[in-house]
Each structure stands twice: as C-alpha cells, then as structure tokens.
C-alpha cells in the first residue's frame, strides 16, 4: 500500500471544471506575433529602433515624445495620446525595456518592484508548472496557461503577486542567477524575467521550439527545453545559443514521443562530477536517460519492486502488493530529491512514483487519485522543494498540494 502523509494543504481560490490534457496541449492555430522590437533587424534594440517606432506607430518625432509617460501608460494598460497601448505591450516588450533604461523611467534604479508589472489582478484558474525561487525570498512560481500569467506565492504558499502578459505559459524554471525562465506555447519561445521587478531580460528559442513544456538546467547553467510537439529536448548555452538537440520522434531506444519533462541528475563519482539527463517519455511510457552530450544510455519502462518487508516472501504464489512495482501510466513530470532519487508524476494514476534512477528500483510512492484536498486529479507537476516537501499542482483546479515523504 502506498503511504502518504499530507502535512498541509493550500486550497485554491477558484474551483474550475476539468480541462482535458488534449485541450490544454492542442496546437495553437493562431499563435501571437513575435516581438517586433528590432525594427531595423540589426539584432540590437537601441535608439534607431525607438526612432523607427515613433515614426511608424506614433507618427511623431521621437524627441517630442514623453517616453516615460508612454512607458508608464503602456505598462498600466492605459491609453497614450488617446490611443490604446495594448498592441505595444504585447509586441514590443524589449523596446519597452530599452525605453525604461534609456529614459531612466524607473527613477534611477529603484530596487522596489514595479507595481505595474508585478501586481495581483486576476485569480488563478489552472496552475500548471511549478518552480522555486533562488533570490532568498522562498517564493514559488506557478504558470497558468488559462489566465496567461505567472503567479507568485510566498514561502507559505500564499498568493502574493502576478506577472501578466504571457501567452499560454507552460514551463517555468529559475537559474542560479534567480532569473525566471518561462516557456510560452502561444509565442513559441522562452522569455527570461527579473524576479525583482518583472521586467523582461531576454527572449530566445523562436523558430526552434513549438511547445516548451518544461525547462531545467545542468551544472554549467545550460538550459534544457522540453519541446513536446517537436519530440525533443533543445539545449541552449548561457548566451541562449542552441548547442545540441536530444532525441527525435519515434519509438526506438534513443527516440521520444511527446516528452513532458527533463531533469539533470548530478552526483560525485570519486571526485568527478557525473551528470545524466532523464526525460519523461510520455508517449512511450518510459523514462529515457542520456549522458550530458545527448548520447542515449538506457531507459526504464518497468520498475523493479523493492525488497519485501520482513516476513513477506515474494513469488508467483504470493499476490501481496508489496511484491510488485506499479507501472507507468501517463508520465507528466520529474523531480530529483536531495538523495538523488527520481520522483515521477503519473498524471492518470494521480500519484508519484519514487525510484532509483540507476537501478530502476521502485522505492515508494505517494499520492492518491481523487477529488478534494489530500487527493490528486489530473496532477500536472511535482517539485521537490529545498525543504524536502513535494509541491504538486492538482490539475483539476487552482489547488496546490504539499506532501511530506518519508
């Protein structure tokens, strides 16, 4: 029997109906336009782009524009010169960042967050992926593709803030510099944000990713983007250059079918840092393992049962459930705990299976399918926090479950 100890539960603010996985991950027919900030296509956002923007969109000489007023009104969603600014907010994020810095619109580097960017206005409807902050706040981040926002919870999992203006955000992760990486399914890109003020720092992956479902990092800071629709893992360096692709569509030993999550497992082997890449290969109902260069190593599709408890003898003659390991149903997410064990979230079974990634041995499980607090229904992510608790998005509503595992 799987044992579970729920320490506390934060119930969601809104209860919503089920959203089928097929509807959540359906192809986007009309993806939002790309960021248009680089108007002269020279790869740099600078005064030349601002000059073109002013002439083409505001029909004014750039020197006659109160750019801080334009910036403030746009970020607040208010009209400028009697015209809506919604188009600019959605399509000129990098140019808005340039305006803010060039005109010193934030008052000379005020460290306080910009309330126009980080301001709680909407309630969550469908919390999807989770990440933990690395800026000392203890906050947690959750994407919500239905609202189009990133929700920020404090260390007690109380909702405190919202980063808006995203387009079907799926993946979220935080690197060692505390920058927030968000995978936008609607814009087919990855956007990087400053947690202090919500300002965008970078955009990458355009033209390379179609469905950025999950993001993680290796020990060198390289960025692993799980692309479910392309059936592969795109690996970018810290300057956002593509350095390799792991996997391709298929059922072969090294191939993937609709991968949903990736984790980099690290350990010290006699003074040498060893890293392996684990991928939740949902379509093939297995976990694939690659070395850090993307070469296939092995896969786990059936888990070995743990040693039986004292007094229990396992064999064909004994149907005791302690003698068997559960099978994968619909792998949705992976997370690694402090001991290096892999927590594999099974969406359809509503449970998490903990296994030894090296041997495939099933260690334990937790979670139970069902409705209401203490149960999981269509769970979408598992995050083993720095405190050792497992943070799970329940999937059926904006509810978060917190689990203490043995």
Image (spheres, rainbow, N blue to C red):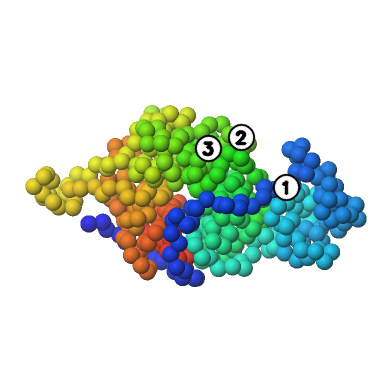
Instruction: Work out whether mark 2 precedes mark 1 in sequence or the reverse, and give the earlier one.
Output: 1
Identify the residue under disc 2: 241
Above or below residue 142? Residue 47 is above
Where in the figure is residue 372, as x and y percent of width and height? Answer: 37, 69
Name the secondary structure under disc 3.
Answer: strand
Q: Is residue 37 left or right of residue 124?
A: right
Q: Residues within 10 Å of mark 2 (few under 14, many from 20)?
A: few
Q: Is residue 347 left or right of residue 56?
A: left
Where in the figure is residue 35, as x and y percent of width and height? Answer: 69, 48
Identify the residue under disc 3: 234
| Quadrant containing the C terminus in the rendered view | bottom left
Residue 121 position by quadrant? bottom right
Instruction: Work out whether mark 2 precedes mark 3 in sequence or the reverse, and give the earlier one.
Output: 3
| Quadrant containing the N terminus in the rendered view | bottom left
Outermost residue toward the front in this view: 29
Q: Residues within 10 Å of mark 1 (few under 14, many from 20)?
A: some
Where in the figure is residue 233, as x and y percent of width and height? Answer: 49, 38
Q: Calculate the distance from the C-alpha at mark 2 to the C-alpha at mark 3.
A: 10 Å
Asked if marks 3 and 1 touch (Cβ < 8 Å), the reply is no
Name the secondary structure under disc 1.
Answer: loop
Can you tell which of label 3 and label 1 is closer to the viewer? Answer: 1
x 10%, y 49%: residue: 318
Above or below residue 111? Residue 280 is above
Viewer-proximal residue, 301 or 55? Answer: 55
x 47%, y 29%: residue: 293
Outermost residue toward the bottom in this view: 14
Can you tell which of label 2 and label 1 is closer to the viewer? Answer: 1
Q: Is residue 235 left or right of residue 69?
A: left
Identify the residue under disc 1: 36
């Amino acid at each position: 029997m799987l044992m579970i100890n729920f320490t506390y539960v934060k119930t969601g603010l809104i209860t919503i109906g089920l959203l089928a996985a097929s509807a959540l991950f359906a192809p986007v027919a009309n993806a939002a336009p790309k960021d248009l900030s680089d108007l002269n296509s020279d790869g740099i956002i600078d005064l030349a782009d601002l000059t073109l923007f002013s002439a083409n969109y505001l029909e004014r000489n750039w020197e006659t524009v109160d750019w801080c007023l334009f910036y403030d009104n746009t970020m607040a969603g208010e009209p400028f010169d009697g015209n809506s600014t919604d188009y600019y907010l959605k399509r000129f994020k990098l140019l808005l960042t340039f305006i803010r810095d060039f005109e010193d619109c934030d008052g000379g580097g005020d460290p306080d967050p910009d309330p126009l960017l980080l301001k709680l206005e909407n309630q969550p409807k469908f919390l999807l992926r989770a990440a933990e902050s690395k800026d000392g706040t203890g906050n947690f981040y959750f994407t919500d593709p239905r609202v189009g926002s990133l929700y920020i919870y404090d260390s007690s999992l109380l909702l405190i803030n919202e980063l808006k203006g995203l387009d079907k955000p799926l993946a979220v992760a935080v690197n060692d510099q505390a920058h927030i990486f968000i995978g936008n399914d609607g814009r087919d890109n990855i956007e990087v944000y400053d947690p202090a003020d919500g300002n965008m720092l970078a955009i990458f992956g355009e033209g390379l990713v179609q469905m950025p479902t999950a993001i993680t990092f290796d020990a060198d800071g390289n960025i692993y983007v799980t692309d479910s629709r392309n059936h592969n893992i795109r690996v970018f360096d810290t300057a956002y250059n593509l350095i390799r692709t792991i996997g391709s569509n298929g059922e072969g030993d090294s191939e993937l079918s609709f991968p949903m999550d990736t984790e980099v497992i690290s350990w010290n082997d006699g003074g040498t840092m060893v890293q392996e890449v684990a991928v939740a290969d949902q379509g093939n109902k297995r976990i694939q393992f690659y070395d850090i260069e993307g070469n296939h190593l092995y896969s786990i599709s059936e888990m070995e049962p743990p040693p039986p408890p004292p007094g229990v003898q396992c064999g064909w003659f004994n149907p005791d459930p302690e003698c068997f390991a559960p099978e994968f149903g619909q792998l949705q997410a992976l997370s690694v705990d402090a001991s290096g064990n892999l927590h594999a979230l099974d969406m359809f079974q509503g449970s998490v299976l903990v296994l030894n990634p090296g041997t495939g041995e099933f260690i334990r499980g937790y979670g139970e399918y069902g409705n209401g607090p203490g149960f999981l229904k269509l769970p979408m992510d598992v995050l083993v926090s720095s405190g050792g608790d497992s943070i799970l998005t329940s999937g059926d509503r904006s509810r978060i479950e917190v689990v203490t595992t043995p």
